[in-house]
Amino acid sequence: MSQFAAPAFFHGAREAAAAPALLPRPLRLPRPARLLTTPAQLARSLWQQLPPPAPGLQACVIIPAKDEAHNLPATLAALAAQVELSGAPLPAGCLEVIVLANNCLDATAAVVRHAAARHRGLALHVAELQLPGELAHVGQARRLLMDAAAQRLAATAGPQGLILSTDADTLAAPDWLAACRAEVAAGAAAVGGRILTRPAAPEPEDLGADETDYPAPAAPAALAVRRTQLRDATYHLLRNQLECQLDPCPSDPWPRHHQHFGASLALTVAAYQQVGGLPVVRYLEDEALWRALCRHDLPVRHSPHARVSTSARQQGRVEVGLSWQLREWAAQAQAQREPEVECPRQLAGLWQARHELRACWQQRCQPTPAGFREWALMLGVQAGEMHTKLQAAKSFGEFWEWVLGTRASVGFHKECRMPLGEALAWLRQAVRRGGPAW
């Protein structure tokens, strides 16, 4: 068995090499004289604040940042330390980092400029924007950044230029970029990297005179959340292993993981343009982008080699994300409730149906009437409509998205929950057997 098959292997937490420098307390910055109100105006302002790209630019890392002055020094230092898989330095000018300091009340932009002066080998740029009203969310910020990155790379590297997304509280492994590039060279259009967590660093104002060097031990509540997090990760890894057994994907083979989130996400300029860019939603914009990639049947890879570690803080900058999930687990632990997850037995049925229906779509053949009605009944859709959609779909991903959306609209997904412990026990048995026994 591959070393990546052991769930514990994924959870070796990567500690920051050095604590971030203490920074002044948040400062209230003046608002710009002219308020930008449309995405086009915001995009133009962002573009005008950036210098021309280097002729040899091959990859662009984008970071949306709102009041992240405390976390950014370590994040940018990790990006400045990127190397090839061999350990050799990156070619000069092949990588740049763009930080969008949006709606900040602290010294985020100043911190980035200080880091640029400190890490002169890294092309590091910062733009400042005040996103107005309904546009003031991470989805809009990340879309502006990814659009700018795609434009800059199109002028230098062309369709194979690599757009990489990470977060302001995230530390990339030294070979993170190189690992993503290796997956693209092997045929992937997009790469979701493995995201580990590390204890959240206290903000400067939270540190007392005696706490800087001697942090307090983790509280029982924090340990309970960590235990749930590890069990949830094990559940997802076992899910992925079973999915690979029932519906193997040549572009995303085992070992793989389940994460394709903004803290570690990479895709080519060609893939980004093909799906029409990042969907502009208030949260889970990374999940929406991944669904768009799958809808177009693009080869996507959940790489165990591209790794980052992100803060386990429970007060994040987005409405729904890791910090939200950690708060949910904390509340469940306090109430002594077992978390519930999607029923793997139901998921196994979905994966088997998807495998059979994909083969039918690829070969443009018809399943037997009895078999077709059986799949339709199990999926919770009308057999006639399913037949029409399968024949008309331009991609199998488009058809499968319709199946999942229809199931959700009729409430099928609400029945498919079970306690986490029960799900883990069932998955372990199913994986050992090579698939569920029906």
Image (cartoon, rainbow, N blue to C red):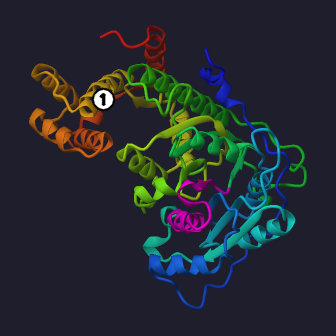
Q: Position of residue 301 (x, y in %)?
A: 52, 38
Residue at 61% from the left image edge and 85% from the top image edge: 31
Q: Which residue, given by chain and number where applicable, does mark 1 sit on?
A: 354
Quadrant location of the N terminus? top right
Closest to the observer: 268 or 171? Answer: 268
Q: Position of residue 279 (x, y in %)?
A: 42, 59
Relative to 299, residue 164 above or below = below
State whether residue 257 appears in this view: yes
Magenta region, main secondary structure: helix
Residue at 56% from the left image edge and 46% from the top image edge: 322
Closest to the observer: 430 or 187? Answer: 187
Residue at 54% from the left image edge and 32% from the top image edge: 257
Closest to the observer: 108 or 299? Answer: 299
Q: Position of residue 162 (x, y in %)?
A: 59, 54
The number of numbered discs placed on residues in the rendered structure image is: 1
Closest to the observer: 362 or 195? Answer: 362
**SS category of the residue bearing label 1:** helix
Categorize mark 1 by other alpha carbons within 10 Å: few (<14), some (14-19), many (20+). some
Where are the magenta residues, as a range? Answer: 141-168
Examine the structure image and report whether residue 21 is included in the region drawn in magenta.
no
**In the figure, residue 363 lies in which quadrant?**
top left
**In the figure, residue 74 lies in which quadrant?**
bottom right
Q: Is residue 26 left or right of residue 356?
A: right
